[in-house]
Amino acid sequence: MMDFYFFTTDNGYKGRMAMEESGLPYKLHLVNLRAKEQFNPEFMKISPGHKIPALHDPEGPGGPVTIAESGAILKYVSQKSQNGLYPSLPAQRVKVDQWLFYGSATYTTLAQQFGHWVIRSPDDNPGAKKFYTDNYIDMLGILDRHLADHEYFADQYSVADISMFPDTHLHGVNDIGLKDFKNVQRWHDAIWARPATQRAWGPHE
């Protein structure tokens, strides 16, 4: 039984979606970021950068393993479950990796700044609001153009899609709106309809 450490953030939902898609047994642990529980010394043994999600697998390769960073967790649980969401063929991996890394390093990073400056910040900073809104809209355009010719980012549903779904759901659907991004809307709705997605976004107590 794996231990999965979670909070209701974009990266937290990425990890939980991967866990639910894997079918592997796990116990969910809520790490309340608002209460600063991520700085608990015991948790920081699992996630040295005090980030969620994090994972402890007592039956890892060669013995127990701990993993932080959402992209690494997506790859790990998909490979362990052999569910095909991280492919085994090198040519397919190249496609998945490109969008997995884009989702992890670029899309989420800028989307989080959009969420901070435009949605949550008590400070009214028009320059930051415009910068991150423009960047987020540009990224939605990038996704939309790619999805015009692809059902999913690497053609078949994969961890690449999971890496970009939560921010699209939280900010694309709820804050910006997807009426000008029909291909992103189609992609989002197909993923939202998956039973594993519904479980991942369901109750966490």
Image: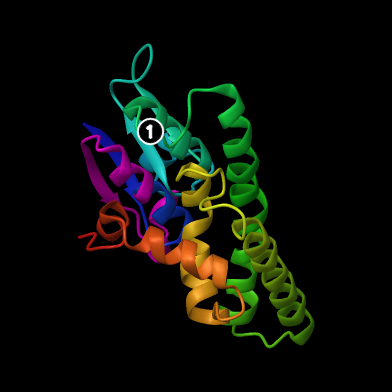
Residue that sits furthest to the front in the current view: 149
Residue type for callout 1: Val
Residue furthest top in the image:
62
Q: Residue at x 71, y 73 (%)?
A: 132
Name which quarter of the figure residue 73 lies in.
top left
Where residue 194 sits: x, y (%)? 31, 56
Residue closest to the eye, 203 or 93 = 93
- Name the foreground residue: 88 vs 147: 147
Closest to the observer: 188 or 121?
188
Above or below — where is 82 with respect to 199? Answer: above
Q: Point out the image quarter for the N terminus.
A: top left
At 32% from the left and 56% from the top, the residue drawn is 197
Determine which quarter of the picture holds residue 199.
Answer: bottom left
| Location of residue 1 with respect to 101 vertically, above or below | above
Q: Where's the C terminus, which quadrant? A: bottom left
- Residue 200, horizontal then vertical, whole percent: 30, 55
Residue at x-position 25% and y-position 47%: 28
Q: Is residue 194 left or right of residue 129?
A: left
Q: Foreground residue, 111 or 186?
A: 186
Mark 1 neighbour class, 10 Å CA radius: few under 14, some 14 to 19, many 20 or more: many
The residue beneath circle 1 is 77
Task: Indicate yes or no whether the magenta region holds residue 37.
Answer: yes
Q: Which residues are magenta?
A: 17-39
